[in-house]
Structure formats: C-alpha cells, structure tokens
Image (spheres, helix red, strand yellow):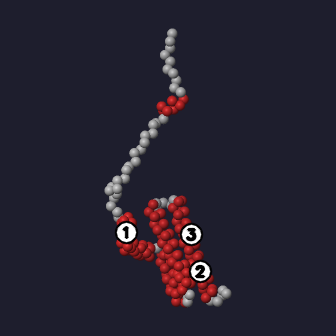
Amino acid sequence: MQTDQVPEASEPAARKATQPVAQPVAQPVAQPDSRPPAHGADQLKSRPGFRRLGPALNNSIRGLLSAMRSESAFRQELAVGLPLIVLAWWLEPDRWQAVLLTAAVVLVWVVELLNTGLEVICDMITSEIHPAVKKAKDIGSAAVFLSLLMAGLCWGLWLLERGGWLA
C-alpha cells in the first residue's frame, strides 16, 4: 500500500517561499528641462560674473537691516563696536594695529550674524524645545562668547599697552 507523502521542503527553500521578493525601485530620471524656475538664491547662482554682485549686495544689506531690527544683541554689539573702531583709527598711529582692532570687532558681528541665522533656521524647523535644537543654539551662543572674549583680549591688551602698563 502506498501512502501519498509530500516531500518536505528543505529549510532554505521554505524560507525563500515565505520571504517577500524585493522589487527594484525605479529612480526618477531628472530631465534637464524639468527643473522649476530659479528664484531666490538660485537666481544668483544662475547669473555669471559681475551680474551677481548687485543682487548679492542687496541681499546682504537686507540681512544687516533685518538683524539690526530684530536682534537686540546685534544692536548692542554695534553700539559698542562702532565707537571702538572710530577710537582705534583715531588714536592708533600704527595702521596695522588699527586694522587688527577693527577685525576683532567685525569678527564679533560676523559670528553674531551667523548665530542669528542658525537660530532663525532652528526656530523655523520646530517651535518645541528639542535637544538637538538646544544644542545647536548653545553652540552658536558659545561661538559668540568666544569671539567676544577674543575681542576683549585684543582691546584690553591694546589699552594696557597704550596706557603704558605693558612694556
């Protein structure tokens, strides 16, 4: 008497039968003419040579004015820094030292502007207190703090030397 026995599938074959088959995903092909029209920063990148300068200058002025209107820290740094720069160029006969003192002040402004830009992007991404956003803002604040320390050191040493307290 013969019994109908179905041979058992081997282990790897049984596993293959139960696993879904991965299908290749079709990647969209970018057509050169299918790009959306350029606007904003892309418009500047599409302009060759000196034709970029006018719009780039306008963007820079808008950024400075925006920071002056919206950022009290930037206004405070301008209020302290501008008189210091005038003082350096008025009192310092060595023009290279005046340039370095000016650079120390301008560095503070640059770092403050970058920090402000970072904060704007973070606030745009989320209004919640997220650990990564807090970390990014804290790092930006630390950069401003270090630039202020460096400017203070430069100006402090200059004043000490100018006053005759350093030989």
Q: Residue at x 43, y 40 (%)?
A: 23
Quarter residue 147 falls in: bottom right
First in sequence: mark 3 vs mark 1: 1
Q: Residue at x 64, y 89 (%)?
A: 164
Element carrying mark 3: helix
Q: How far apart are the alpha carbons under marks 3 and 1?
A: 37 Å
**Which mark, by number, is residue 48?**
1
Foreground: disc 3 or disc 1: 1
Q: Position of residue 13 (x, y in %)?
A: 51, 30
> Eyeballing the image, is 104 above or below 26?
below
* Residue 62 is at least partly visible in this image: no
Residue furthest to the front: 49
CA gap between label 2 and label 3 equals 18 Å
Disc 1 versus disc 2: distance between alpha carbons?
40 Å
Helix, strand or loop at mark 2: helix
> Eyeballing the image, is 6 above or below 14?
above
Q: State which tag comes first along the sequence, 1 or 2.
A: 1
Q: What count of labels does the image hold?
A: 3
Where is residue 146, by image quadrant? bottom right
Q: Tell me the quarter of the image containing the C terminus.
A: bottom right
Determine which residue is flagged by label 3: 142
Pick whichever, 108 or 12, lies toward us: 12
Give the crowd class for mark 2: few <14, some 14-19, many >=20 residues within 10 Å.
Answer: some
- Of residues 11 and 81, which is closer to you in this image? 11
Query: Pointer 2: what residue?
Result: 154
Q: Amino acid at mark 3?
A: Ala
